[in-house]
Image (tube, helix red, strand yellow):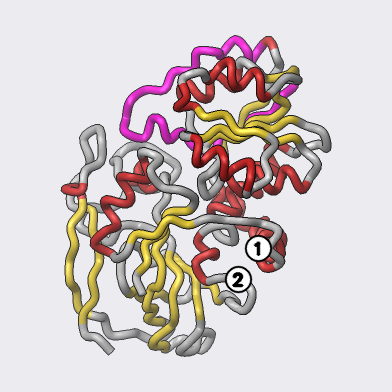
Amino acid sequence: MASTFQRIVLASRPVAEVSTGNFRLETVPVPELKDGEVLVRNHYLSLDPYMRMRMEDTKSYAAPQAIGETMIGGTVGEVVASKNPKFAIGDKVVGMLGWAEMGVSDGVLLRKVDTTHIPLSAYLGSVGMPGMTAWYGLTQVIQPKQGDTIVVSAASGAVGSVVGQLAKLRGCRVVGIAGGPEKCAYVVNELGFDACVDYKAGNLLADLAAATPDGIDALFENVGGDIFDASLARMNPFGRIALCGMIAGYDGEPLPIKNTRVLLTMRLTMRGFIVSEHIELWPEGLKELGALVATGKLKFRESLAPDLAAAPEAFLGLLKGKNFGKQLVKLI
């Protein structure tokens, strides 16, 4: 086994936009295992928008990423050494071992997964945190009813793509919002959405109105800003909004909501949520998501960065919508 491995640490906090200079690639020794610990060789690393907020030293739902420490992130890989009776060498596991080729875990937040019918990488996407984010926001916040019109922003992304497919399975009419004709075509033709509005086409309000002739009953919001305001203008009375992400404002610029009056006049319910705070529902959600992926009823797409050194550039691309589907870093 190798005596060293590579990791990426947060070198400095970003000022406005993130740059590759905020990260540093390091080579570190493989640590000696203590009793109860396991050593994991990571195969894939997840890149997610929430990481941008964790880079800031500001009040939020979680502690900020520490300077000089391995960047936080979900991982899937294989146990290569174990002093924990619950894990054997060769076990495939999902955890939070960060931007690193290897990692040590005490086993508490490490979960064994079955790759017989589900690809290992899917446990970082549709059958992982993004899939659970979609499942929770839809089933617990939006609580869809058959025949509802549901709009999903960032519809081709790791979360939005799952939201739309789950909503279709529950008998809803689903309209996506995505950037560019290629992404919109994928959302409709591959994922089965009823329509998709290309916000880059420059006609967002009119195109969204045409795609939602009966208004919007529920909104799954991943973007914020002008896209959020456009959907608010189409909301029906007693509409429900799952506020999942505000990626348009992750570089620090304020995101005013111009259509706040609609919250009152349409008697809307809006709720923000963090899926890691609802672990008690993960078994139920993952059971449904895993069965759908295993049987081919839930489709997903991945963008792969080729190695650890490519992770910062891929992360910057993710924040600007350059990824297509779930953004991963392939380590093996």
Would you say 92 lies left or right of 27 here? right
Element type at mark 2: loop
- Please report the residue visible at 46 percent of the width from the left and 68 percent of the height from the top: 95
Of the 4 image quadrants, the one containing the C terminus is bottom left
Residue 330: x and y in percent read: 37, 66
Closer-to-camera residue (271/255): 255
Task: Give yes or no for residue 250 being in the magenta stretch.
Answer: yes
Q: Amino acid at mark 1?
A: Val
The picture quadrant where one finds residue 297 is bottom right
Q: Determine whether 116 is above or below 73 in the image.
A: below
Closer-to-camera residue (158/82): 158
- Please report the residue visible at 41 percent of the width from the left and 67 percent of the height from the top: 44
Q: Determine whether 185 is above or below 84 in the image.
A: above
Q: Determine whether 116 is above or below 230 in the image.
A: below
Residue 176: x and y in percent read: 60, 35
- Please report the residue visible at 62 percent of the width from the left and 49 percent of the height from the top: 190
Would you say 129 lies left or right of 61 here? right
- Please report the residue visible at 21 percent of the width from the left and 43 percent of the height from the top: 19
Q: Which residues are magenta?
A: 238-264
Q: Residues within 10 Å of mark 1 (few under 14, many from 20)?
A: some
What is the CA distance from the residue labelled 1 to the residue labelled 2? 7 Å
Q: What mark, if any, has residue 170 been given in the picture?
A: none
Callouts 1 and 2 close, C-beta under 8 Å: yes
Q: Determine whether 14 is above or below 201 in the image.
A: below
Q: Amino acid at mark 2?
A: Ile
Would you say 256 lies left or right of 295 here? left
Closer-to-camera residue (228/321): 321
Q: What mark, if any, has residue 293 been given in the picture?
A: 1
Q: Residues within 10 Å of mark 2 (few under 14, many from 20)?
A: some
Q: Earlier in the sequence, mark 1 or mark 2?
A: 2
Task: Give yes or no for residue 315 being in the magenta stretch.
Answer: no
Q: What mark, if any, has residue 118 been given in the picture?
A: 2
